[in-house]
Image (cartoon, grey):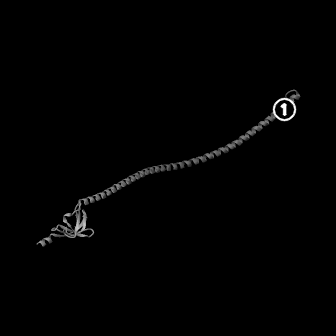
């Protein structure tokens, strides 16, 4: 019966267990304190592969991550990571979350800056669009003015040609009148000279006859 109980009380496992808090548990070659120590101190929190449990002796057979197999007291094993390990894991997770949070904040900042840049560019494009519309309106107005000015230039050119023709006509008329007046002045001058000569001749004759005849003829 005792042998049967011993067999029944031993269980085979292949799950993971952990050394309790703040302990260094020796790993022995057998299921008692008399057996040889094959590892002087497994630190608390160290994960081990549980191979089997002997409830009669209170020992559990385990395997380390290095493949070393041995026995240690079951009371030093727990099924969950110890508090310090959990705390370390939580701290590591918190650091990871904090890093992710910082990256998220940085990404958010970059996104906001990009949005502000795009907003400024959009405003600049809107201003440029307004200026382009105004320039187009100005060009359209100037184009209409250019057509009107071109028509005015054509009309003024025609009027200029007419005025030039009139000026040429007046110049020719002036030249003709100047020639006629010159001829008239010449004839008048010649007539005056002839009359002067005749009057002088007549007056000389009068003086001559008076001197020699004692009176006027």
**What residue does disc 1 label?**
204
Q: Tell me the quadrant of the picture where the N terminus can be found.
A: bottom left
Q: Nearer the viewer, residue 4 or 187?
A: 4
Q: Residue at x 62, y 46 (%)?
A: 164
Label 1: which secondary element: helix
Image location of residue 69, percent across then percent down: 24, 70
Task: Give the residue at the far top of this rendering.
Answer: 214
Image location of residue 50, percent across then percent down: 22, 68
Residue 135 relative to residue 32: left or right? right
Residue 153 relative to residue 122: left or right? right
Task: Give the residue at the far right of this rendering.
Answer: 212
Q: Nearer the viewer, residue 195 or 145?
A: 145
Location of residue 143 with respect to 187 vertically, above or below = below
Residue 203 relative to residue 102: left or right? right
Location of residue 18 with respect to 203 vertically, above or below = below
Give the quadrant of residue 99.
bottom left
Q: Count the marks: how many?
A: 1
Q: Residue at x 83, y 33 (%)?
A: 202
Q: Nearer the viewer, residue 119 or 68?
A: 68
Task: Give the residue at the far left of this rendering.
Answer: 1
Q: Nearer the viewer, residue 132 or 76?
A: 76
Q: Tell me the quadrant of the picture where the C terminus can be found.
A: top right
Query: Could you classify mark 1 by the number of other residues whose Cα lies within 10 Å: few (under 14), some (14-19), or many (20 or more)?
Result: few
Q: Residue at x 71, y 40 (%)?
A: 181
Image location of residue 167, percent across then percent down: 64, 45
């Amino acid at each position: 019966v005792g042998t049967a109980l011993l067999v029944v009380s031993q269980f085979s496992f292949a799950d993971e267990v952990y050394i309790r808090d703040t302990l260094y548990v020796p790993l022995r070659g057998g299921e008692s304190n008399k057996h040889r120590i094959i590892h002087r101190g497994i630190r608390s929190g160290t994960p081990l592969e549980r191979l089997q449990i002997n409830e009669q002796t209170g020992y559990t057979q385990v395997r380390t991550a290095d493949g070393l197999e041995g026995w240690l007291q079951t009371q030093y094993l727990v099924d969950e990571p110890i508090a310090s390990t959990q705390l370390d894991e939580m701290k590591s997770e918190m650091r990871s979350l904090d890093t992710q949070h910082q990256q998220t904040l940085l990404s958010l900042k970059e996104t906001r800056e990009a949005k502000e840049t795009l907003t400024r560019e959009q405003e600049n494009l809107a201003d440029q669009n307004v200026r382009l519309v105004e320039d187009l309106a100005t060009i359209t107005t100037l184009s209409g003015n250019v057509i009107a000015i071109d028509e005015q230039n054509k009309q003024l050119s025609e009027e200029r040609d007419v005025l030039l023709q009139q000026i040429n006509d007046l110049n020719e008329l002036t030249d003709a009148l100047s020639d006629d007046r010159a001829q008239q002045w010449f004839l008048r001058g010649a007539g005056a000279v002839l009359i002067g000569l005749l009057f002088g001749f007549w007056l000389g004759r009068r003086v001559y006859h008076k001197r020699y005849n004692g009176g006027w003829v």
